[in-house]
Image: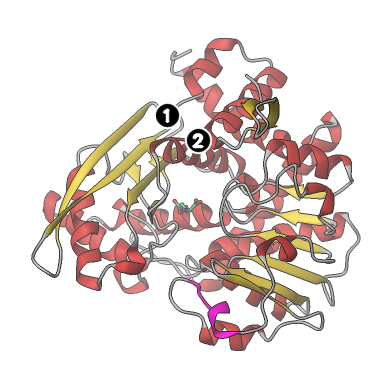
Amino acid sequence: MEDKDVVEGKDNKKKVTENLNLLQSTQTVIKNALNKLGYPEQVYELLKEPLRILTVRIPVRMDDGSVRVFTGYRAQHNDAVGPTKGGVRFHPDVTEDEVKALSIWMSLKCGIVDLPYGGGKGGIVCDPREMSFRELERLSRGYVRAISQIVGPTKDIPAPDVFTNSQIMAWMMDEYSRIREFDSPGFITGKPLVLGGSHGRESATAKGVTICIEEAAKRKEIDLMGARVVVQGFGNAGSYLAKFMHDAGAKVIGISDAYGALYDEDGLDIDYLLDRRDSFGTVTKLFKDTITNKELLELDCDILVPAAIENQITAENAHNIKASIVVEAANGPTTLEATRILTERGILIVPDVLASSGGVTVSYFEWVQNNQGYYWTEEEVEQKLRDVMVSAFENVYNTALSRQIDMRLAAYMVGVRKMAEASRFRGWV
Ligand code: GLU
């Protein structure tokens, strides 16, 4: 499999460009990881695609009386280790391939933080920014009715992702409980506290990223106090992260949303920005003085955190990145070619499947609490999350060092092993 595509350039000459296809690049790294671990080809054949993907069409009565039919997906990558687990995103750009790649990443995340799950992922092609509260409720409930046969507390457990939140999880849990005719809090995670949610779930992804930043900074001998941090994206992960960095004494000199970016070399007023941010993470529209996304990524800083969307650091800008550490809070922000360039330049990358695994870790804690019907304090959750993240970081970092490979390949090796072993013991390969 190749990581490069040959395409016709403007002048009709064949040009080699980077492969920005997420599924294909994920498969490339899975293949390399399995090779390094010594698994035969058939294991790759099993793991290169999800075991199952369901496409559904969801009719929704809109507020004006018309009916719109939305397309949704649920992919289940591999359930050898246990039930599948992963979020549901509401976004106009959702595609089947993206959901597939995201379900594979969930398997890797669960492997890296050693949870008893395989990976799953869902998505609905829609733009929640243009829908009313009640339309969103009907869409969320419709999605659960459409996928109800393949999900459940011991089958596949959804959670929040891009543009979905605890309210949407609450509607989905309620719909599932009505269908099954018993209360099923363990069907979904990321719920409000009063419906069996866990302390610390909402900020868990950012907390996990923060712990990874602390660990990476130690390795690079960077003092977080006064360190210059740039965060791309001001959604759930990005905004909490900016706050945690600010509270840790770092200087957050740049942030961005889908419409622009803000920069202040003396550090931005994060509390003010959080206060003015809307529920979709938009804040830069309120300012006249903005910089571009490209300028943001190339700012002189110590730590760069892409916390927005895919394919942001590519072969085109990887040479201009000035950070010493890149921590991927988003899924898939750095291409494979860019990973190679950054690694060669001595920049420490903490890959998405490690850095963003704090969310699913606390989701697992939520599910455990739901199953036992006994709930933990915020301090307990935080300590447990810290233990898990620190040991996952050490495991990946030491694998990269001892094998002399980049952090992404190391993370995939750690992430894929349990799933491959479980599939072997079950006699699937
Ligand atoms: N959507 C989050 C992720 O991509 C969380 C998934 C979960 O909590 O199950 O990791």
Residue type highlighted by circle 2: Ile
- For the residue with label 2, is its CB less than 8 Å from the closest atom of ligand 1? no
Q: Residues within 10 Å of mark 1 (few under 14, many from 20)?
A: many
Left/right placement of residue 128 relative to residue 337 reads left
Q: In front: 86, or 56?
A: 56
Q: Position of residue 114 (x, y in %)?
A: 57, 42
Residue 37 falls within the magenta-colored stretch: no
Q: How is the image coloured?
A: secondary structure
Query: Which residue is the site of mark 2?
Result: 104
Asked if one can make out residue 360 in the rendered structure from this viewpoint, the answer is yes
Q: Residue at x 19, y 57 (%)?
A: 141
- Where is residue 379, by image quadrant? bottom right
**Could you say where residue 26 lies in the image, as x and y percent from the top left?**
58, 32
Q: Is residue 282 located in the magenta-colored stretch of the structure?
A: yes
Give the residue at x 14% y 70%. Answer: 63
Label whose residue precedes the other's in the sequence (1 or 2) = 1
| x, y percent for residue 100 | 44, 35
Query: Where on the picture, by quarter, is residue 353?
Result: top right
Q: What is the residue that sits farthest to the left in this orientation?
A: 65
Q: Start and end of the magenta stretch? A: 281-287
Image quarter of the N terminus: top right
Disc number for residue 351? none
Q: Amino acid at mark 1?
A: Pro
Horizontal arrangement in the rendering, residue 202 relative to residue 138 (left or right): right
Considering only vertical position in the picture, is 328 above or below 174?
Answer: above
Residues under numbered marks 1 and 2 in contact, where contact means CB atoms less than 8 Å apart? yes
- The answer to whether 364 is drawn above or below residue 13 in the figure is below
| Pointer 1 residue | 50
Q: Quadrant of residue 387?
A: bottom right
* Whether residue 118 is visible: no
